[in-house]
Image (spheres, rainbow, N blue to C red):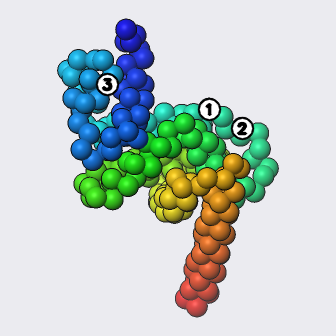
Amino acid sequence: MVKKAEIPKHIVDTALKLAAERGWQELKLVDIASAADLPLATVIGTYRSKSAILSAYGRSIDAAVAKGSDLGDLDQPVRDRVFDVVMRRFDAMKANRDGLRVIARDLRRDPLSALCAGGSVLCSMATMLEAAGVSANGTAGLVRAKGLSAIYLSVLRVWLEDDTEDLSRTMASLDRNLDKAERAMTFLCRRRGATKKAA
């Protein structure tokens, strides 16, 4: 018997396990309820859709990364702090990688669900920035969150297939993407400065 407080996590864990076994696209809430040994009404009352389940999973990962953040390291370069936070996110997701691999594959065939997931990713990346000691507030924060979302989704594809023990392929991809982002921001800042001088 699942305790009431544990029901949300139990549903999420069951859904991810079923995704690895059966696929995500055709999976229904009634299937998740059956496998979780819960009434369908309980599952629907907790999560009204599979997208809601994925959002809840994302929030649990956000919380795990934030809990493990040490803002005593603010003297480190921003790039290093962001690198560490993103890698800790992948580490927190490791136990569910098989299910996430299938979900990522199936979402490419389901634009509506992918669109819903995209909003969750943006919120998660704002949380990751804050966990790294970088503001995600205001227009500048939104730009940072969108930039980190693009980086994360690019590296996520590598992580899902990374069979190296130390995730060296994932780390190399993240490193390259952060390098590109740094160069782009430097270029934009220089261009903005040049425009102001010309004016």
What residue type is disc 3 on?
A: Ala
What residue type is disc 2 on?
A: Asp
Residue 11, relative to residue 68: is it above or below? Answer: above
Percent of width and height locating residue 18? 36, 35
Residue 35, numbered label: 3
Residue drawn at x 57%, y 41% as measured from the top left = 94
Query: On the image, which quarter does residue 80 sit in?
Result: bottom right
Residue 70, numbered label: 2
Residue 50, relative to residue 4: is it above or below? Answer: below
Residue drawn at x 38%, y 29% as measured from the top left = 14
**Pointers 3 and 2 in contact (C-beta within 8 Å):** no
Between circles 3 and 2, the one closer to the viewer is 3
**Pointers 2 and 1 in contact (C-beta within 8 Å):** no
* Residue 34 in the figure: left or right of residue 173: left
N-term mark: 3 or 2: 3
Find the distance from the CA under tag 1 to the CA under tag 3. Answer: 30 Å
* Disc 3 element: helix
Quarter of the image that includes the N terminus: top left
Find the distance from the CA under tag 2 to the CA under tag 1. Answer: 8 Å
* Disc 1 element: helix
Of residues 179 and 139, the one nearer the viewer is 179
Percent of width and height locating residue 157? 50, 59
Q: Mark 3 packing: few (<14 Cα in 10 Å), some, or many (20+)?
A: some
Percent of width and height locating residue 185? 61, 72
Query: On the image, which quarter does residue 187 sit in?
Result: bottom right
Between circles 1 and 3, the one closer to the viewer is 3
What residue type is disc 1 on?
A: Lys
Quarter of the image that includes the C terminus: bottom right
User: Which residue is denoted by mark 1 in the rendering?
Assistant: 67
